[in-house]
Amino acid sequence: MSRNQIIVLIGTVVFFLILYFGFEIIPPKNKDLEMSRTLNIESTGISNLIRDAMMKLDADQKNIIDAVNLDMEKVVNDTLKRIEMIKSLSGMWYDYGFPSIAGTYAEDIANLSGTEDSWSMAGTTFTLCVRSTEEKKIKDYCSKRAIRAFENAISIAPENIDHRINLAGCFVDNPSENNPMQGILMLRDLNAKYPDNIPVLQQLARLSLRTNQTDKAIERLEAAIKIDPANQITICLLATAYKNIGNNSKASEYEKKCVN
């Protein structure tokens, strides 16, 4: 894994933790409705995922998961407590190395709470799943749900560009066979509308690096560094880009500023 990928992954995980434990649970206006709503864990795929995952856990991990599930059965009519337990299950499965299951529980919370942050949380978890697996079945399972989660977040907060960037990233990470350029075109459209948006420039630069279009990557990163000279992601990407074209002096300049 490259230095850039590590930085992005660490940043994403930090975002995951902050968002996961910080978002509002249930707006008051939704409480009556949600009290009667059952958990929305989809039957297609998730049962098999949990079954297979349980076989890979050690005894202590299984006991913890089983204990939380038993506790949830005791609070059927207490939605707030139930959600807190679902959050615990999601966090546990993520820690145990199963982001597909963690994402499914995060999606369930989003269905209950209906907030922008909870849908973004679910989308982020599923995105981490897509990026961490090579198994097509799991990748497709998580990709489909990440797309749906970010679309829901956009419907709640259409002015938040980050959700649109993340949605485009879903199509880049797992492109459709029928429309493989969809994610790239979405990012280009965002770049046209928001030319000074640094995350958009960074995403396009990563794609350029991935396709060996280093000159384009440098052009976009140099634009980004002018907007925010201290941005670590931009700095580290520039170090890689200049190294790729053999400009060792520039690469060294940015490598010294790139904090791992």
Image (tube, rainbow, N blue to C red):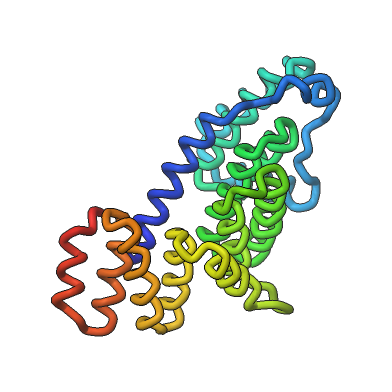
Q: Is residue 3 visible?
A: no
Residue 5 shown left or right of residue 139 in the figure: left
Is residue 108 placed above or below 144 in the rendered structure? above
Which quarter of the picture shows residue 243?
bottom left
Q: Residue at x 70, y 77 (%)?
A: 179
Can you give x and y, in whole percent of width and height, for residue 95 in the image? Answer: 48, 40
Q: Quadrant of the C terminus?
A: bottom left
Q: Residue at x 20, y 81 (%)?
A: 247
Q: Is residue 160 visible?
A: yes
* Viewer-side residue, 75 vs 115: 115
Q: Quadrant of the N terminus?
A: bottom left
Can you give x and y, in whole percent of width and height, for residue 245 in the image? Answer: 27, 84
Residue 48 shown left or right of residue 106 in the figure: right
Which quarter of the picture shows residue 189?
bottom right
Is residue 213 placed above or below 73 in the rendered structure? below
Can you give x and y, in whole percent of width and height, for residue 142 in the image? Answer: 65, 55
Is residue 139 placed above or below 57 in the rendered structure? below
* Viewer-side residue, 156 vs 42: 156
Q: Residue at x 47, y 71 (%)?
A: 204
* Viewer-side residue, 60 vs 220: 220
Is residue 199 placed above or below 206 in the rendered structure? above
Q: Residue at x 71, y 31 (%)?
A: 113
- Total number of numbered discs in the rendering: 0
Which quarter of the picture shows residue 121?
top right
Can you give x and y, in whole percent of width and height, for residue 106 in the image? Answer: 64, 39
